[in-house]
Image (cartoon, rainbow, N blue to C red):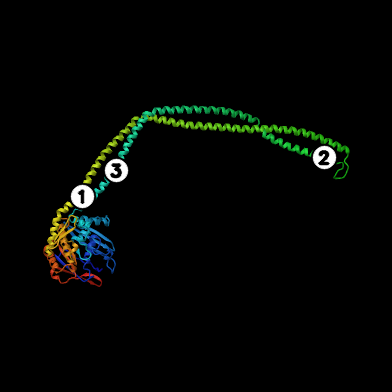
Amino acid sequence: MSTGNQFTEVDFREHHTNLIVGTNGAGKSTILDALTFALFNKPFRKINKGQLINSTNERECVVEVEFSINSRDYFIRRGIKPNLFDIEVNGVSLNKEADDRARQKILEETILKLNYKSFTQIVILGSSTFVPFMQLTGANRREVIEDLLDIRIFSAMNHIIKDELRDKRQQVKSLDLKKDNLSDKISMQKKFIGEIEKQGYDQIDSNKDKIKTLGIENDTHIEMNELIKANIDDAIKQQNEVTDAGEKLVKLNNLKGKISQKVASITKEHKFFTQNTVCPTCDQNIEEEFRVNRIADVQTKARELQKGFKDLETSIKTEQERERQFNQLSKEITKLNHDISQNNTRISVNQKQIRGLEEEVQTITTQLKNRNTEHEKLAEFKSNLKKTTEELIIRKEEIIYHDYAYSLLKDDGVKTKIIKKYLPFINQQVNRYLQMMEFYINFKLDEEFSERIESPIHEDFSYASFSEGEKMRIDLALLFTWREVARVKNSVNTNLLIMDEVFDSSLDGLGTDEFLKIIRFIIKDANIFVISHKTDMFDKFDNVMKFDKVKGFSRLVS
């Protein structure tokens, strides 16, 4: 797009009718993009916002707009690279702490009282990118008219009430749950008090009987432990008597080994002298008397050793028996100690049960003593239930009132009644302007903002049935009507009207002449700017503004 490299100032108040001319690409329509960008952060044409930036230096896109409403002076500055958005009221910055979205909302809803869609229906009429009222959807048509009649507040109120209804229904749901919970608590508390009074003493008696039984059982275990301890003492005494058996048995077995060695040695010697008369080593004869005496001595020793060996075996058997008795007593003592341990475990378990039963007895006794406290709890539950029920009734009544208000503020409620009131005026004004443009049809909008068009020769026309020039006449008539409605309702009263190439495409010569009469002699409360390629209408306007492209930049040259 063609944009300037120097600041261009346009005074919208100086002349009643203004013609803006220039060749294609000269930048004459840039004024529309600049105006909508400054006010609504979007260009008028179907281009990206980034395309507003100068294509040569690619930075410093800034638009400033000054206007007055009800003796207040407003200044809007918006820019790209760097990003800027400032609002000043009587020279003071407005809400600098708020983000751009919040300040944009203030600008549209509080200051301008127009959104982009409504702005383009009242202030700007374009030929290419503009969507006329008759080409809007039913919902968008309604939005425009609600803005003009200043009844969008009812939609906002409707949303608020809708949110409040949701909150109150949630409150009712919570209160219902709370009520049910309190009812359950009251029922449980009554049952609890009844059980205390009915079963308390029986439970105490039962617990005391169990405590007595467990005490007797523990006494029995204690007596058994005393008997077992006596048996253990006897066993220990007996064990002490045979405690040396193992040591003696070891000594006796050692002695048995030595005797056995001697017996083997004597037996070998007896065999030698019995079988040999000559020494096998030196071959000398063994004296007979020596040999006989030696055999006799060996036999005597053997008999003595044999007798000692038998006595030793008897002693070993005796000590083995004593060792067996020791081991048996050890097992018996271990078993008796185990029995004591088991009895002690049973005593411990019984004592724990006794403590539990005693605590339960104490608890029940306390509960029986404190029945007044439980009755106080019951009274508190009943009081809370009463308060909850009363609050629930209030919330349900509020829902009824909010439901009624919600139904009134819906599209088919108060807003429809207001729209019905203004529809005759709207239709009257549209037809008035159509007649001024020598277009004799009967145009009517119904409550759904659908058109019904009748002509002297045809019935049930639609907007789509007409030529482009005829459609343009209807669009212009609606534009003028919306401005009149806004003025009468005092929702929006602007001195600015901009039309982009309305003569260049659709209006014929007759339509153009009639239109020029309207803007010059009928529309006296606005400064009108007409953007056109045509250069044969200079004398029809109070002022002519010419845009040209100089070295790739758009400039206002006259």
Q: Mark 3 points at which residue?
A: 173
* Badge 3 amino acid: Lys
* Badge 1 amino acid: Leu
Of residue 66 and residue 393, the one placed in the foreground of this image is 393
- In the displayed structure, 117 sits above or below 355; it is below
Q: Residues within 10 Å of mark 3 (few under 14, many from 20)?
A: few
Q: Which of marks 3 and 1 is nearer the N terminus?
A: 3
Cα–Cα span, label 3 and label 1? 25 Å
User: How many callouts does the rendering have?
Assistant: 3
- Residue at image position (52%, 31%) is 344
- In the displayed structure, 329 sits above or below 557; it is above
Numbered circle sitting on residue 409: 1
Numbered circle sitting on residue 155: none
Q: Name the residue under label 2.
A: 271
Cα–Cα span, label 2 and label 3? 120 Å
* Badge 2 amino acid: Lys
* Residue 51 in view in this figure: yes
Label 3's element?
helix
* Mark in front: 1 vs 2: 1
Q: Quarter of the image containing the N terminus?
A: bottom left
- Picture quadrant of residue 471: bottom left
Q: Could you say where residue 172 lies in the image, as x and y percent from the top left?
A: 28, 42
Of residue 246 and residue 433, the one placed in the foreground of this image is 433
512 horizontally vs 307: left or right: left
- Picture quadrant of residue 311: top right
